[in-house]
Image (cartoon, rainbow, N blue to C red):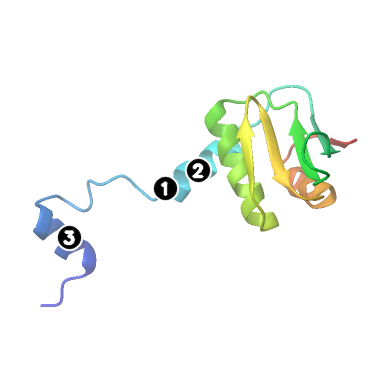
Amino acid sequence: MDLDWKDKLGAAFGIDPDAVAGDEHEVESEAVEERAATGRLDVMLDKRNRNGKKVTLIVGFDGSDEAVKALAKELKLQCGVGGSARGGEILIQGDMRQRVCDLLRERGYKVRMI
């Protein structure tokens, strides 16, 4: 009888593979789906205090910290760049304003590019 990897893992560690939580991607997508109740997101280009390097800032997010981080992760993945999320602001490396605006509008956010 051929066992799949989940059955082998369950036998090795004495756990039920079906009892293990679902895919992490599903949890992240639920957090990304959380929408800001009111207001809009402002997308702007910033170069101050960054040695002349450009970054795209997204401000005005009213969601939880987990939702901000999940959205930042998704945006970074879609843009293929780095960035961070702190204090309700998302920072994306480079001038990605147009792409970020398009991605946020696809997800149902109201966006204003500054």
Q: Residues within 10 Å of mark 2 (few under 14, many from 20)?
A: some
Which residue is at a point 9% across and 51% down the rendered structure image? 14
Disc 2 vs disc 1: Cβ atoms closer than 8 Å?
yes
Q: Give the Cα separation between the discs numbered 3 and 2.
A: 25 Å
Which residue is at a point 90% across and 35% down the rendered structure image? 114
3 over 38 or under it: above or below: below
Location of residue 22 in the rendering, given as x and y in whole percent from the top left corner: 35, 48
Name the residue tied to disc 3: 9
Amino acid type, callout 1: Glu
15 horizontally vs 37: left or right: left
Secondary element under disc 1, as helix, strand or loop, is: helix
Residue 90: quarter of image: top right
Location of residue 40 in the rendering, given as x and y in whole percent from the top left corner: 79, 28
Pick whichever, 23 or 66, lies toward us: 66
Q: Give the Cα separation between the discs numbered 2 and 1.
A: 6 Å
Which residue is at a point 10% across and 59% down the rendered structure image? 12
Amino acid type, callout 2: Glu
Q: Give the Cα separation between the discs numbered 3 and 1.
A: 18 Å
Q: Quadrant of the N terminus?
A: bottom left
Which residue is at a point 56% across and 27% down the rendered structure image? 65
Secondary element under disc 3, as helix, strand or loop, is: helix
Q: Residues within 10 Å of mark 1 (few under 14, many from 20)?
A: few
Q: Residues within 10 Å of mark 3 (few under 14, many from 20)?
A: some
Q: Which mark is residue 57?
A: none
Name the residue tied to disc 2: 28
Work out whether mark 3 precedes mark 2 in sequence or the reverse, and give the earlier one: 3
Pick whichever, 29 or 73, lies toward us: 73
20 over 68 or under it: above or below: below
Secondary element under disc 2, as helix, strand or loop, is: helix
Q: Which mark is residue 24?
A: 1
Residue 2: quarter of image: bottom left
In the image as oriented, which residue stretches furthest toward the bottom? 1
